[in-house]
Amino acid sequence: MIAIGGAIGVGLFLGSGGRFAAAGPALVISYAVAGIAAFFVMRALGELVSYRPTSGSFVSYATEFVGPWAGFASGWMYWVNWAATGVAELTAIAIYVHLWAPDFPRWLTALIALGVVLVVNLASVKAFGELEFWFALLKVVAIVTFLIVGLYLVIFSIGGATPSNLVSHGGFFPLGFGPVFMSLQAVVFAYAAIELVGIAAGETKDPDKVLPKAVNSVIWRIAIFYVGSVLLLGMVLPWTSYGPGESPFVTVFTQLGVPWAGDVMNLIVITAALSSCNSGLYSTGRILRSMGQRGEAPRFTRSLSSRHVPVGGILMTAVVYVVGVAVYSYIPERAFTIAVAISSLGTITTWGTLIYCQIKLRQAWTRGELPKPAFLMPGSPYTNWLTLGFLALVVVLMPFADEDQRLAFYLIPVLAGGIWGGWRLVNAKRAPATHVQQRVVPPQ
């Protein structure tokens, strides 16, 4: 439920509306292809967790199988991912609430939402888990309800719902193949957070039994929810009915002539965004603490509350969310898409790290250096390289897409330079300590 709760957020509930308007019904191909990549990422994660579950997740695996620098880089890129994702979720909440209260300041709506999830995360991991379970359940119920209603409308051709909507308004590729490829970056963002299973593994009872089942169930459920929902959205209404300013699910239920249904769906998508933001604070708090313990993040990120909550890391991410809300008040029309584009860079880095670490793990147990895990990734190493190729393609396409994706692409050298500089600084601080230790330790 944690993985589903993290993954089913504004990428599907809000972002798919704008992507429909940009790519047409063929958008479902983008979701299917990205879903296949997500499948192999989850199976790679499953093998790594089967080898050794840890709250440090891919940061710990990158450090072990690639090197300390890889753990440092992947950890900070994951933080960038969730920092940008949280801003996207909060701006989406402001957009949703604006439909009901157009005169209420959007920035204040986002700030109130942040306060709610921050209090929950600081309370205890149990409070987070309980709230996330119910948030995720609401989203699952909403998606399942839409799937049932959508199928009913299409089967009985109610309200113009018909499979022919996929091809009768300019064809399946009404705007050509280009927009479908260019939508891959935003679709990858929609699948982000499925890797939360790996982070939760370190705080899970009997992970050897629970995690393989969780990995497999998350894969097929998300595939149905995402690909199935997008396919039905294209059948229920013409793709020209959707736009970037409103959730396509709200659009469908509003056009059914049942206004209250649209309001209910709007409330659910608000909880969906809260859920994803909630997951972001949870995961970054633990990743930052794991890095802080190795001296790779500020010292205060190591701090734990009396309830064993990583307060320092959670508050650090929350501060960035506040800054993002302030920026949103100046560019409300672009804040969401910019945040999505930047976040996808972190998602691609995280997925690539997991895939590559699984390759190194496989090589190690093949040589007999490590025990063979019980839960193996299918098709490895060929599926690894195909998935890495797909992720590289998404990055290569970014400068040819819209202005916001180009902005994110141009940030790559800035992020790389910042991480390189941070790693140099960390090593510089470690060197004197190592030198002193070598001097005080007597010879053997």
Image: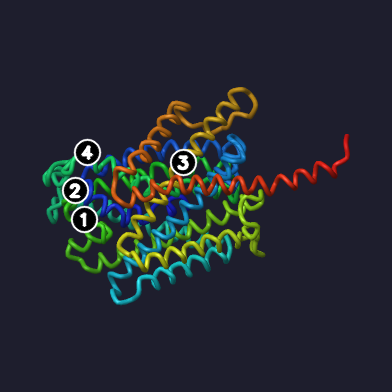
Q: Are marks 3 and 2 in contact (CB under 8 Å)?
A: no
SS of the residue under disc 3: helix
Q: Amino acid at mark 2?
A: Met
The disc at residue 177 is 4
The disc at residue 186 is none
Which of the marked residues, 1 or 4, is nearer the chain's N terminus? 4
Which of the marked residues, 3 or 2, is nearer the chain's N terminus? 2
The Cα–Cα distance between marks 3 and 2, rounded to whole angstroms, is: 32 Å
The Cα–Cα distance between marks 1 and 2, rounded to whole angstroms, is: 12 Å
Residue for badge 1: 242
Residue 272: where, in percent of width, then height? 39, 59
Residue 57: where, in percent of width, then height? 56, 45
State the residue lying farthest toward the bottom.
103
The Cα–Cα distance between marks 1 and 3, rounded to whole angstroms, is: 30 Å
The disc at residue 235 is 2
Instruction: Give the vertical position of 68 relative to 154 (above or below).
Output: above
Marks 1 and 4: which is nearer the front?
Answer: 4
Which of the marked residues, 1 or 3, is nearer the chain's N terminus? 1
Q: Are marks 1 and 2 in contact (CB under 8 Å)?
A: no
